[in-house]
Image (cartoon, rainbow, N blue to C red):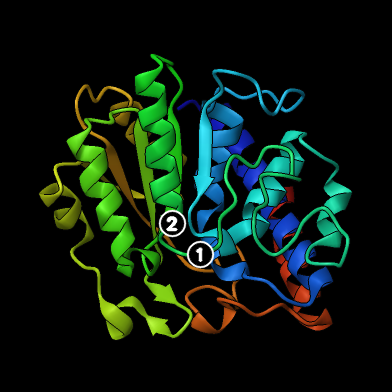
Amino acid sequence: MDTAKRISLEKQATKIRMGIIEGVHSAKSGHPGGSLSITDILTYLYFEKMNIDPKNPRMEGRDRFVLSKGHAAPALYSVLANRGYFSVDELMGLRHTGALLQGHPDMKHIPGVDMSTGSLGQGISAATGMALSAKHFKENYKVYCACGDGEIEEGQVWEAAMFAANKSLNNLIVFIDNNHLQIDGTIEEVNSPMPIDQKFKAFNWNVILINGHDFDEIERAVEEANKSTDKPTAIIAETVKGKGVSFMENQVGWHGSAPNDEQYAIAMKELEEKLASL
């Protein structure tokens, strides 16, 4: 990836992180930690890779994205807003009664959302169904999905993984946001899914390990995944929960807590300084 493109993506990711903080602060609730950890992956997909059209969200043949870890909706909303699906001002209405953006993605009302999610473990099954449909109808679109490392403690994830491999769904690419923390503590303390890569390999998936905050590695992984001819791909992305806001990084308490006014000011100052430095 050339330097100009990388800097452009870094700037966009920083703006998206600012949108996440704006939204959860305004809502006084939400999930900033896992939204910040998945930001760089979503930024790359929506601003560089996916075949999409914000002016025509239901475009036939578009690539699909399913946020299986639906509580990270603030990240998806900020990406969609910054990509032009709806006004960035909508982020300030996050979780407000009657507003466009509710606590979890809603495909019926929010432009750009391909699947309603929130019940953990179920999104990857929907993504698998989309990929199977593309195969059946001989469509060329790709299906991207993002799961949390805590989420994959759910058994339904592995039913979907078994099915996807059995049907040779090489048009399915699943990112595992491996930030090591979930609502009750570390994934190791709660119910360790490790080693994640070996589990997906055992289910006959193509597996790629990356730093989920490195755009070069994200790009290389997606390009490699798109070359697969007979297997779905799991991209295991090592990430930092709360990435980009110093006091949120690697802190389990920020899984589902909103910043107060003082914390909001500190977070926004850090992100504004980051943006100015790029």
Q: Amino acid at mark 2?
A: Gln
User: For this rendering, which residue is in front, 212 or 106?
Assistant: 106
Mark number for residue 122? 2
Q: How many marks?
A: 2
- Going by the numbered disc 1, the residue's amino acid type is Ser
Horizontal side, residue 250 vs residue 73: left or right: left
* Location of residue 127 in the rendering, given as x and y in whole percent from the top left corner: 43, 41
Asked where in the image residue 10 lies, by quadrant, the reply is: top right
Q: Name the residue at 39% across, 31% down.
A: 131
Position of residue 118 measured from the top left corner of the image (x, y, whole percent):
55, 62
- Residue tagged 1: 119
Q: Is residue 21 left or right of residue 88?
A: left
- Indicate left or right for 165 with 247 as reference: left
- Quarter of the image with the C terminus is top right
Q: Relative to residue 175, is residue 249 depicted above or below? A: below
Decide: is 186 above or below 158.
below
Q: Nearer the viewer, residue 101 or 247?
A: 101
Q: Residue furthest left?
A: 202
Are discs 1 and 2 less than 8 Å apart at CB?
yes
Instruction: Answer few, some or many: residues within 10 Å of disc 1's Cα (few below 14, many 20 plus, some between 14 and 19).
Output: few
* Residue 214 in sight here: no
**Element under label 2?**
loop
Q: Position of residue 186 (x, y in %)?
A: 36, 80
Distance, label 1 to label 2, CA atoms, is 6 Å
